[in-house]
Amino acid sequence: MLTIRIVCIGKLKESYLRDAQAEYAKRLGAFCKLEIVELSEYRLPDKPSEAQIQKGLTEEGVQILAKLSGVCVPLCIEGKTISSPALAEKIASFANCGESTITFVIGGSFGLSDEVKQRGAFKLSMSPMTFPHQLARIMLLEQVYRAFQIQSGGKYHK
């Protein structure tokens, strides 16, 4: 069974987001093994300098790189926006190439380090709009669930 791993910076703080994550985890159980790895956010001052931001990204990047396995798909602004059917195809193509784990990576509020982005086999952008990283996790879970529904011919995706 394919493992979908989501490595993310920070914890879900709101109960409604934790509930949504639990619901998608339950739904995904029929299609894959889901692993969510929450890593500590680097603490920055209220108005960080560019150097402080880069140091934070580097520190978070070290944590993320240590948790990567299988094929890496960072979510980043430089990534490609694709349709839900195209994501379903992308997940299937990784699995068909023998990958047993697909690791999606969600950074903190300042994004991801260049080292993490460079590890990506495919860089994904959810949208040209900006979303809170906690909401991005729920959106990703929904899209992964939708992808499996598309692959299985389910009625969820219309």
Image: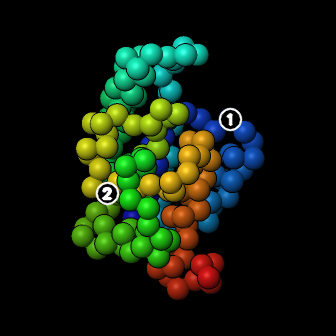
Q: Position of residue 41 (x, y in %)?
A: 50, 27
Of residue 36 and residue 17, the one placed in the foreground of this image is: 17
- The amino acid type of the residue labelled 1 equals Lys
Q: Residue at x 39, y 27 (%)?
A: 57
> Which amino acid does the dot numbered 2 rest on?
Phe
**Which quarter shows the N terminus?**
bottom left
147 in relation to 125, above or below? below
Q: Nearer the viewer, mark 1 or mark 2?
A: 2
Residue indicated by mark 1: 13
Provide residue 92's location: percent of width, then percent of height.
36, 73
Q: Is residue 20 above or below residue 117?
A: below
Q: Say if 126 sits above or below 97 in the image.
A: above
In this rendering, position of residue 9 left or right of residue 120: right
Residue 71 appears anywhere in the view: no
Which mark identifies residue 26? none
On the image, the x and y values in percent for residue 108 come to 50, 34
* Relative to 3, residue 50 above or below: above
- Is residue 9 visible in this depiction of the protein? yes
Q: Image point 25% across, 44% down: which residue?
A: 118
* Crowd band around label 1 with a 10 angstrom C-alpha radius: few (<14), some (14–19), many (20+): few
Residue sitting at x 27%, y 55% = 121
Callout count? 2
Q: Secondary structure at mark 2?
A: loop
Q: Which mark is residue 122?
A: 2
